[in-house]
Amino acid sequence: AIHRGTLEILEETGVRMEHEKALNILEKAGCKVDRSNKRVKFPPALVEECLRKCPSSFHVKARDPKNDLRIGGNTVYFATFPGMQTVDLNTWEPRVPTRKEFYEGVTVLDALDNLHLLVNYTPYFGFEGIPPVMAIPECVAGKIRNSTKFQTTGYAENCEIFNIKMAKAVGTETIILAMMASPPLTYYNSAIKCAFRTLEADLPIGVDTGTVFGATGPATIAGSLVTYTAELVAGIVLIQLIKPGVRTFIAGFPHPQNMRNGAPAFGDIGISLFDVAFNQICRKYEIPCRNTASAYSSSKKMDFQCGYERGIPAILSAVSGAQFIHVHGGMYGELAHHPIQDILDDDVVGMIGRFLEGVKVNDETLAIDLIEEVGPIPGFYLNKEHTRKWWKKEQFVPEVADRLTYPEWIKAGKKSCLDYAKERMNEIVATHKSSIPLT
């Protein structure tokens, strides 16, 4: 029903496309184009043809081949989430980070085992001493200098020209979130212009949107799914007409509106309901997708609320079919980011990753012979070679959680996971080096 509704909106209502060359391409392909208001109406057959042209999975190249990604199918990757500023851990007030803090933040991200890619504006929207127009290119450069992991990036004021050149210069690729819709049902000239540049550079491309239920989309989850999907599919049609078979994924940042204050309702379980349903649509289309529900929390601190508003959506996204999921680092929407939050989040997604691996069942793990050997009490398994081999494979051991017994915890100074995360951050900053330094 959502797919049928999407086709109907695209055919009857249409999408505003503010780019003359794009209008020409769409009109030539059989779309109805009203030049007076730049509205495009899409025939259903063309829509479904372009959806079929999208690859169901694709490879992307990082600066270090060990960090290359295969996006699509049943792979699940975890990604950062940005924050405009860093945050003071004593007052919880945001402030502009220094260049040193930006670079150290990227170093921490590079060191985390369960983080697979760095997204645009990560960790911060720039840093002290640079003009806003240079924020995105400086972010991209900072990540290239301090990490070999794959990254995505954004665009503004034509900066994608330089982002593309930097990626090419160091032999990596980047997914550019080029086709970013402006709800409801609009693509501005800058987004489409960036898409053309990305496709000309033979880079993978992201199609993105962000619907607020009750504001830029219907208040119902199903209704917003229709407009959200229509916006994304309109972008897919255009890029597949420009370059058939181009590597692409679809993404977005949906939220209900908090009707008490007009702000997005960060942390609302309705975002997960939306994402889980959207993942099934993406599975139908066989197009990789990204989820953001677990990146947002309404909490302004690293506290219990922040934990449950991130952990629950992250596991729901992972088991419902998202190919990559924003979790690491962001605080209160995109207001702030902090490496300590990154380190805490890495344990969360490590637990989820272990769950996704499932239960291995074979002769060795069933351990029938061992069970017969040990038998009833007084038999035990602690001194067995099988235990030494398998316990670390079967258990997930977090890096910074408090797992001491109570007497040990008292003796160790009553440390919390925040204390351990601070210690780990200091250790990473002091010792971690990117695997392929820039020359």
Image (tube, rainbow, N blue to C red):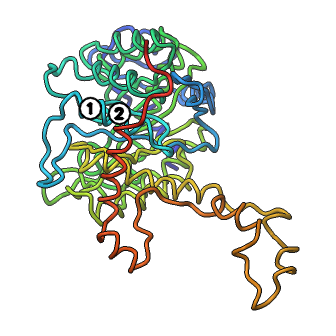
Identify the element where label 1 is drawn.
Answer: helix
Q: Look at 20% across and 55% down and name the residue there.
A: 300
Q: Nearer the viewer, residue 225 or 192?
A: 192
Q: Residues within 10 Å of mark 2 (few under 14, many from 20)?
A: many
User: Could you say where residue 191 lies in the image, as x and y percent from the top left?
Assistant: 33, 20
Residue drawn at x 46%, y 22% as measured from the top left: 174
Q: Picture quarter containing residue 130? A: top left
Report whether 144 appears left or right of 4.
Answer: left
Q: Is residue 28 above or below residue 95?
A: above
Image location (x, y in percent) of residue 57 = 62, 32
Q: Residue at (35%, 43%) from the top-left corner?
A: 253
**Outermost residue to the front:** 411
Of 151 and 176, nearer the camera is 151
Say which element carries label 2: helix
Q: Residue at x 31, y 21 (%)?
A: 155
* Extreme-bottom residue of the structure: 377
The answer, for residue 335, to whether it is visible in the render is: yes
> How much space separates mark 1 and mark 2, taking CA atoms?
6 Å
Label ID, residue 106: 2
Residue 356 relative to residue 211: left or right: right
Between 112 and 24, the residue placed more toward the observer is 112
Q: Tell which of 93 and 287 is nearer to you.
A: 93
Amino acid type at circle 1 is Phe
Residue hosting label 1: 102
